[in-house]
Image (spheres, rainbow, N blue to C red):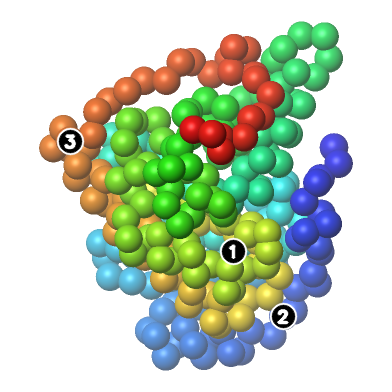
Amino acid sequence: MFNPLRRWFGSSRAGDDWAGVAEWAKRCDYRFARSSDGSGFVIEGGPAKTAWRLEWGASQRHYFNGPELRVRGDVGPTGELQMLVIARDLMRLLEQQVFEESTEGTETRVDDTLPEEMRWLVLYPKLPRAQLGPLRETFGALANLPQAAQWWLDAPLVKQLEAASAWLPEPLPLVLLVQRGRLTLRCALAQPEVGALRAALGLFGAAQTAARRVGEEISQGKIGAGRPTAWGPASAMPPTDDAAH
C-alpha cells in the first residue's frame, strides 16, 4: 500500500559512528550498546522506579519511512488504562488509512493486526480540542477511561509537547502510548543527535510522571471505568475533523 508519509519522513542512510552519543551516555552513567546487526543502538538509564530503555534504528511502524526513535518504561499499576497522544497531522492520515483498510472490498472488515494507535483512533473518543489548550492545533489525545487523557496532559507534559517542534521535523512524527502499565514514545528521527535524544528523554520523563499520577487517580477511584463499544464493523466510520467538538 502507498505510504502517504514517505514525502515527509524520507529514508536516511544510518551512519555507524555514534561516538558522540556513546560518550554522552557514558557521562550520564547510562548503558550504551550497539544493536546486534550494527544498524542502531540501545541506551538504558534512570533510577529503578522510572527506568527507561531508548532504542534508535529501523522503524517498527510502517508509517515511519526511515529510522525511528523509541523510548519505553513502566508507569506503575494502571489497570486496563489505554491512552494515546498523537501529532494531529499523523492522526488524520492514520485515520484515513484505517478507514480505507477496514472498508476494502465489498464488506466492511476490521484488521485487528493494525498497531494499537491506529485501532484506538476509531475505537475511543478523542479529547475535544477545547480541552487541549495550546496543543489543539498540533496534537490529538484519547483514552479508554473518561477524563484520563485530560488528566494525563498536565502542565509539564504540555510544555514538553509544545517544545517538540524544536527537535522534530514538521509535521511532527510523534506518538505517546500507554498500555498495560507501560509508556512508549515513538518518533521518526533521521539522525540520533544528542540534543534530540536529550529532548526525547525530557518529553518521556514528563509523560511517564503524569501517567503514573493518572494510575494513582484510577486506584483511588477518581477516574471512572468507562467501557467503549467493541471494536468491530460499526467502528469503521470515515475520519472526521473534531474541530467543532
Q: How many marks?
A: 3
Q: Quadrant of residue 172?
A: bottom right
Q: Amino acid at mark 1?
A: Leu
State the mark number for residue 16: 2
Q: Amino acid at mark 3?
A: Lys
Mark 3 or mark 2, which is nearer to you?
3
Q: Which one is in front, 171 or 130?
A: 130
Looking at the image, which residue is at 68% across and 59% down?
A: 171
In screen coordinates, is 200 left or right of 167? Answer: left
Alpha-carbon distance for marks 3 and 2?
Answer: 49 Å
Q: Amino acid at mark 2?
A: Asp
Does 230 sit above or below residue 161?
above
Q: Earlier in the sequence, mark 2 or mark 1?
A: 2
Q: Which residue is mark 3?
A: 222
Label 3 sits on a secondary structure element that is loop
Q: Quadrant of residue 178?
A: top left
Report if residue 236 is visible in the image: yes
Q: Which residue is mark 1?
A: 69
